[in-house]
Image (tube, grey):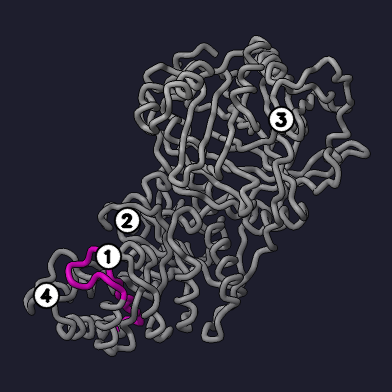
Amino acid sequence: MRHTARCFSLVWVSSIGSTLPLHHGGDGMRTSIATVSIGGTLEAKLEAARSAGFDGIEIFENDLISSFATPRQIRSWAERLGLRIDLYQPFRDFEGVPAEQLSANLRRAEAKLDLAAELGAATMLVCSNVATATIDDDRTAADQLRRLGDLAAERGVRIAYEALAWGRFVNTYRRSWQVVERTDHPSVGLCLDSFHIFSRSSTLAEMGEIPGAKIFFCQIADAPLMDLDPLSWSRHYRLFPGQGGFPLPEFMSAVLSTGYDGPISIEVFNDVFRQTDPIRTARDAHRSLRYLEDLTARATISTPASPMPLERLPPASTIRTHDFVEIHGTVAGELSNLLTGLGFRPHGTHRSKPVALWTLGEVRLVLDDTRSPGSNAKVTALGFEVDDPVASAARADQLNITRLSRETAAGEQVLYGIAAPDGTEVYFCAPHPGSEPAWAREFSKVDAAEHEAVLLGSVTLDHVALTEPWYSFDEAILYYRATLGLEPEQSVDVADAYGLVRSQALRSADGAIALVLNVQPLSESPPVHHRGADHIALRVSDLPATVRRLRRAGMRMLEIPANYYADLRARYGLTDEVVAQLQDLDLLFDRDDRGGEFLQCYTRTVGSVFFELVQRTGGYDGFGAANSSVRRVAQMRSPT
């Protein structure tokens, strides 16, 4: 697979190793994925699971029913692909019923157990009764599950009993264990599912009471933290590990401490994932398990009770700072004019590539103006200074992330790059003792005496905001967590004239690096294109003084409506004098609950890029989300 990259206008080719399926080969935890987690036909899902490197699969009943292949053909196909069929699921509404209903349920169960045996599935999942249970009694449930266990044993199949978070009587893992323990049947055990446990706010403390031998299956799902009924939450908002807010390393450690040594399986119901390419989605799922395995291994170092060795990834190299941002398509020089107005100066052109380096203090922008006039300017690459670029690239290889290999002329710096889900290129740059990185010396210097610094005081790169396609937003969150060690903050929805935009900030542990990801709108018709713009935020020490100087130089910032300032006065109790100053300079204001304050303003948009100027005081560490809707509407009415 070839990948044409844009950084410094060079051609990059994905490394062969990063596109091959990654199998553990018996070392490390055994991975599985439910077919419900990815889109397409059952055949496409099996191929995707194999391509991603999974060891096994769960066959979801609806996928089997809609397939034209027989169970025996599916079994044969899975065997040829090297996949184990770990689970057939789900069998619903079995226990806690009167005798006459039980007879019907047992007849139904025989047919499904025959099917599981024909598939070669080792286990059949039985969900706790939701719709037909009328007897809230553990003894009755256990007696009935014992009857089911006898039928399963005759066919060489095991029963994994799972407590659904919305089960009528059994809806916690502790209650399901009480039932299974009372059942006391060698073919009846538990299925533990992280979603059902955490959506009920259950603790993990009692998991140590369960013998690992009685846990027959383990399912993993992450999810955003929401105040929603568990059924709706489960059916639409599950995520792959690392994309939500559940403490999954703690869950894994608790499960493994019991002695469980079976598959760790992804079971995710998500409307978006089922609409995307199954191979890409399966690889994202497998990547999430590798990331979770690494986190768990580093947190627990495999407890003595666990027979399952956990594989570690190469360590994430410490990320130090932003090294550069690259923008392509400069709209016939408009972006250069904007940068000049802000005080950036042209550092020089690359000695072998048609790109230019612009600098302002230690902020470095690489501009490519090789596209045709009028092409859309967009952030296309990010460079980060890290302690060990080689280790960072090796970690990305183990996460099955597309690796980029730079074509360099003699004496040019080696940069290690990887492709982000949206196509943005990310580069790991070596530390540099001075103010200038080694790669910057590849650009010829120009006399900058005539360029006056417009921004006052120290100027740093505060954050970069990128638009993400709706189908890769959650994938991007996992990508930046796993490769750069950035941690996501609480997701927020911001309003504009056309609806809500999901926004997610990610930050390094020391706060030096911040990225903000925003969902790109589906509509591309004007003026909605402003919603899909990337932006670069510059932090200054005195924003009002900076804006006044920009005005004297002929630049005006994005105009903000007067109604905003009337609301601001009421919301924060600001004096008339302060509000008048903010309004005169088109500055937006925010204050956090600790008293920290934030000032921000915006340039015009060039193509799909604009700049934000910010000032932070009192420890404010947000991004002015309360002002985002005002900014977005103002941009829609402002000419580019």
Instruction: State yes or no: discs 1 and 2 in contact (Cβ < 8 Å).
Output: yes
Residue under label 3: 457
Residue 213: which disc? none
Asked which secondary structure carries label 3, the reply is loop
Instruction: State yes or no: discs 2 and 3 in contact (Cβ < 8 Å).
Output: no
Q: Distance between the residues labelled 3 and 4?
A: 75 Å
In percent of the image, x 54 and y 64: which residue is there? 292
Q: Which circle, 2 or 3, is nearer the viewer? A: 3
Q: How far apart are marks 1 and 4 (CA)?
A: 19 Å
Instruction: Decide whether the magenta segment is chiefly helix, strand or loop.
Output: loop
Horizontal relation, residue 103 to residue 199: left or right: left
Q: How far apart are marks 1 and 2 (CA)?
A: 9 Å
**Going from the N terminus, do you reach mark 2 or mark 3 first?**
2
Please, what is the three-letter code of the amino acid marked with disc 4? Val
Work out which quarter of the rendered image holds the C terminus and state it. Answer: top right
- In front of the other: 368 or 162: 368
Residue under label 4: 97
